[in-house]
Image: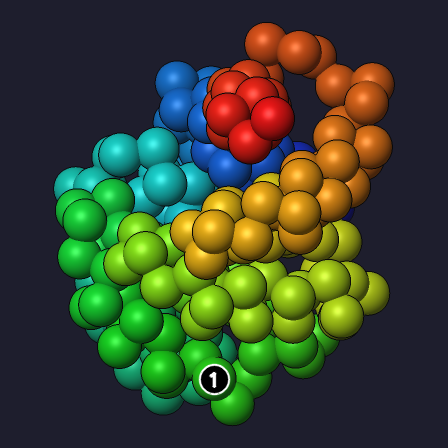
Amino acid sequence: MSHGFKEASAGIIASLAGFEAVCGNDSDARQNAKTALAGSRGLDVEYSAAYPLARAGDIAQARAIADALTKRFPLNTFVNRVEVPIILATIEIHRSNPARAVELLQASSSYELGEYAGLTPVYVRGEAYLQMREGSKAAEEFQRILDHHGSDPFDYAFAHLGLARAYSLQGDSTRARTAFQDFFALWKDADPEIPILRAAKSEYAKLQ
């Protein structure tokens, strides 16, 4: 029984690491991910920790986990077609190789919007298109998240900002402002010092 609680608590901490990473709190993300891994090396915990590690720039450990998962679970469909591609694609975005990230995420396309894969592959692909300055393609990905937010409320919270950035790339200031405002409405009670919120406010101000 105690083992079960340990696994569950590690999973919660790993999920927190993911949230911190997307928010831009890289130090907290890395610390929470490592705390989670110290508590459990279960499949779900390892993936949930590797993703924020990749986002927060701990590329070596994220890649090591991805390689280990592939070796441990060579026949696991979700490991090899969802989890590992997400980790590797996130690493490529961090390395400024967004086209490679999009290529890697092709493996996940058949599983997106489902209960297990959720919307994370869509979100990461949207980020890759933003880095490629493909505003129209990025907007399509983030809009898919908004249209299917019940599949993954976590990524939904950030998709408005992704959409705002995509519209900005397209030069559509009107729709960009609306998307930014939708994002701010969701985050109206958030700590104003959260890096992603500060960045969004700065970007929004430039549209005025």
Looking at the image, is 27 positioned above or below residue 154? above
For mark 1, what is the residue? 109
Looking at the image, is 65 positioned above or below residue 199? below
Residue 20: image quadrant is top right
How far from the left and from the top, in percent, is residue 81? 39, 80
Q: Residues within 10 Å of mark 1 (few under 14, many from 20)?
A: some
Residue 92: image quadrant is bottom left
Residue at image point 65% right, 71% down = 144
**Residue in front for this viewpoint, 116 or 109:** 109
Looking at the image, is 105 positioned above or below residue 193? below
Counting every numbered tag in the picture gives 1
Figure colour scheme: rainbow
Q: Is residue 199 left or right of residue 178?
A: left
How far from the left and from the top, in percent, is residue 7? 61, 45
Residue at image point 55% right, 31% down = 207
Asked whether residue 89 appears in the rendered view, the answer is no
**Residue in front for this viewpoint, 107 or 194:** 194
**Residue in front for this viewpoint, 113 or 10:** 113
Which structural element holds mark 1? loop
Residue at image point 28% right, 58% down = 132
How far from the left and from the top, in percent, is residue 22? 51, 37
Asked whether residue 143 appears in the rendered view, the answer is yes
Amino acid identity at mark 1: Ser
